[in-house]
Image: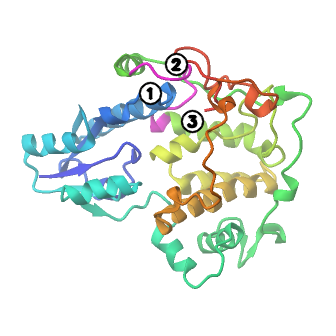
Amino acid sequence: MDTVLVFGDQLNRRIGALAAHEPGECRVLLVESEALLRPERHVQRLHLVITAMRRFAEELRDAGYDVDLRRAPTMAAGIEDHVEEHRPDRVIATEANSRAGRALCEGLGIEQVRSNQFLRHHDELATWAEGRRSLKLEDFYRWTRTELGYLMDGDQPVGGRWNLDADNREPPPDDASIFTEPQASRLDRVDEEVLASLPDGKGAEPVGWWATSRRAALARLRHFVDHELVRFGTYEDAMTARSWSLAHSTLSPYLNLGLLLPDEVCDRVEEAYRSGAVPLNSAEGFIRQVIGWREYVWGLYWLWPDHADSNALGHDGDLPPMFTGEASTDMACMATPSRACTSGRGSTTSPG
């Protein structure tokens, strides 16, 4: 029997290698790497990832999959221990979302299948970039939107304008109560078990704001589309201490973990616009973040492998202490801690 290795940011049955295997056709391996559970990481991030992995494992078991969820000192050790114990015919994985993950798979002889976790595979951006003197986001966005068909009337953008960013720069309203509080889930036994297994980290302990299952992530998507998307465009760039979330979706963690996929998010947003529930500037502004910025940055990550260490501007100074909470500042955006991320165990005033 084959083993399908699922990384902690691929938690969806529609993704890659797992999508090609039905229950009974494979064993699924998920590894909680202790090397990644470093105390300098935010406790809410650690809780989110590990809890989501455990809930996904239960989801797969309920669907009839044979699942090996194990904690190990490193990813490599967990995979090697699994292979020694179960002797699979082969280990298959969806292309990892990081160079380190792909190098790990190559080093261990793990077969990788093409990822469909993004709407455009990064080799498509590489093809688009060939021969271009500059790689402007706006050009990439228009090309991607045309190819995918979002908010299009034939070969032209709905409303005659590609980008409505000029309409999305209003200051925050005097009455911040128009923004709803993000949904929250009640912490249960799984949450408590995960928290007990984590090192003491930075930030406040979770209170249920971050969904740790696909079902809860879908509920967050519905809440955003039904209640906040209508205001998203207008207040997209606004900041205020009276609301930590404003009209933002807070869906990025679920897209990054695979609990939500970008097509289902963009489909719901376009449906809301086409039905007349939200204005065009909100729908276009949000879809641009997903099929524009997110896909663009993802593609550049693979196109420019040395970019993270390039330091083209020669910035070699230490990080100002206000960013770590070691000094005060009059900058309102840094001086006001987020209720979502700060206080509690190992508290910090970093915005997280």
In the rendered structure, are the residues bearing label 1 and label 3 in contact, judged by CB atoms less than 8 Å apart?
A: no
What residue is disc 2 on? 205
- Tell me, yes or no, whether the two marked residues, 1 and 2, touch with CB atoms within 8 Å: yes
Judging by the rendered image, the residue that carries numbered circle 1 is: 47
CA gap, disc 3 and disc 2: 22 Å
First in sequence: mark 1 vs mark 3: 1
Q: Residue at x 84, y 51 (%)?
A: 168
Name which residue type carries label 3: Ala
Return the x and y of residue 145 as percentages of the image width and height: 65, 69
Residue 98 visible in the picture: yes
Q: Nearer the viewer, residue 235 or 84?
A: 84
As drawn, 54 above or below 163: above
The residue identified by callout 3 is 219
Q: What is the spatial separation of the Cα atoms under label 1 and label 3, in whole angstroms?
A: 19 Å
Whole-percent x and y of residue 18?
Answer: 30, 53
- Viewer-side residue, 120 vs 341: 341
Mark 2 or mark 3, which is nearer the start of the sequence? 2
Q: Residue furthest bottom?
A: 131
Q: Which residues are magenta?
A: 199-215
Q: Residue at x 37, y 16 (%)?
A: 196
